[in-house]
Amino acid sequence: MAGKVHLIGAGPGAADLITVRGMRLLQQADAVLYDALVQPEMLDYCPQAVLIPVGKRCNKASTAQRFINKMLLDAAHKYQRVVRLKGGDPMLFGRAQEELQALAQAGIACEVVPGITAALAASADAGVSLTSRGQARNVLFATARVGEGEAGSDWVRPVLAADTTVLYMGVKQAAEIAAALLAGGMRPDTPLLIVENASLPNAREWAMSLAELPQAAGWELAGPAILLVGEVYRAKQALADGLPLQRLG
Amino acid sequence: MAGKVHLIGAGPGAADLITVRGMRLLQQADAVLYDALVQPEMLDYCPQAVLIPVGKRCNKASTAQRFINKMLLDAAHKYQRVVRLKGGDPMLFGRAQEELQALAQAGIACEVVPGITAALAASADAGVSLTSRGQARNVLFATARVGEGEAGSDWVRPVLAADTTVLYMGVKQAAEIAAALLAGGMRPDTPLLIVENASLPNAREWAMSLAELPQAAGWELAGPAILLVGEVYRAKQALADGLPLQRLG
């Protein structure tokens, strides 16, 4: 008889920002399949488990996803308590749907345990709320899709309509993102934050205006980074204004 | 000397969906100020602490907020380790900015610990990802503002631009929300979910089309509910189609 799979959000990185339920399930797991984004310290919760790295980052090709689905099914047939540990939250840019579907088709029971998504951890670190009465009544979580032909600017419209936007996985394309948002009519002085390695000891944070964003294009980042855009970051940006870009946090 | 405040997200409700860090800080707290949305079981983590209910739901008036700010400052002057425990995540519709500002102005140190927001817990329960490759590349978290005069339809434009939308605290105004979205051009067959008490044993879930949403207006809900809208809910809605509205979950 096949085992049960728990698809668990590991959260933003810090080992103590997983949920209590996630930690307890790790402590009881027979096997744990984990992402490249999962920090090694997180695996200290499950010294008893067989550890299976699936070495995936969020933007890898679908071949990799099919391989992960296969490893997940194999593990569920071999072990009773299987944890699939994913960085962030499984249901937000986590490709969970494909894994859930593969498990359902094979008749394997699966439960999802939510995780802290990077935007929430970055906001906690920065001390700036994503929403704020009278100033930001909504927040969009999106990915920028640059260089994808005609569909490449589709991502801009919802960003322009939202009060606050968090762009996941976009900093490498900072120049193209800035160009697309400016072309769409976003003001050059719109404030933004880049937060790298949210929640980890080596977290870094930069505040700037949209006009300055292209300067970030050449940066060598040491870990995953998100881009937070909107008027709620005005005070942070004002502190940094006129200074060379540097860590504020 | 004033104490330190930790502003902690309690998460969606289930006691084991707080973060490990949040739980540990509760275990060490001298005083805990908690919302009406915080479940009693969550307070089992801190039997040693002075418990101070601040009796607030998300949509109360700003007078209540000023009173909470005052209670928070008083507690920080009286106790060394103060926890302010808020339902969901503090940085998303949590009015955290006002509390952070009050603490900063009084020179009191504060750290924020993120929490699982209701949308992530509801998605985990429902087994449907907020984003999905090729189908939903972004998700908007918003509140519907109906009956606020001219500004009352401002909230619609970002919803229409987003692939998936989660509306917090809107189910009582289901009829007005449906009317505004239909007037904005959203298709009547757009699928949606209502999830009440996400993560709790008494959680309930309903799938329907936008055209059916006004039927929810008269419902007596037993707890906080969110409304999730978008094509990702098509399969759930198809299962419910033609049946009287009922719990699927």
Image (cartoon, coloured by chain):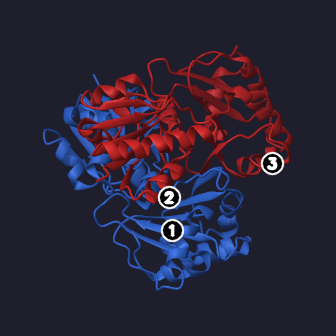
Chain colours: A blue, B red
What's under tag 1, amino acid-wise? Leu
Distance of mark 3 from mark 2, alpha carbons? 25 Å
Choose top left, top right, bottom left or bottom right for residue B238.
top right
Q: Say if B76 sits above or below A202 in the image.
A: above
Q: Nearer the viewer, mark 2 or mark 1?
A: 2
Q: Quadrant of residue B180?
A: top right
Whether residue A10 appears in this view of the structure is: no
Residue A185 makes an appearance in the image: yes
Q: Earlier in the sequence, mark 2 or mark 1?
A: 2
- Residue found at x 71% / y 57%: A161
Q: Which residue is under mark 2?
A: A128
Percent x, y for residue A239? 50, 75
Q: Amino acid at mark 3?
A: Ala
Instruction: Give the letter of the chain under mark 3.
Output: B
How much space separates mark 1 and mark 3, taking CA atoms? 28 Å
Of the pair B247 and A36, the residue shown nearer to us: B247
Q: Dot 3 corresponds to which residue? A: B151
Element at label 3 = helix
Q: Residue furthest left?
A: A48
Look at the numbered disc 1 and give the secondary structure of its residue: strand
**Residue under the point 54% across and 80% down:** A241
Left or right side of A231 for B113: left
The quadrant of the image that shows the C terminus of chain A is: bottom left
Residue at figure coordinates x 59%, y 59% from the top left: A165
Q: Which residue is mark 1?
A: A193
| Coordinates of residue A245 in the picture (x, y in percent) | 46, 82
Image marks 2 and 1: residues in contact by CB distance under 8 Å: yes
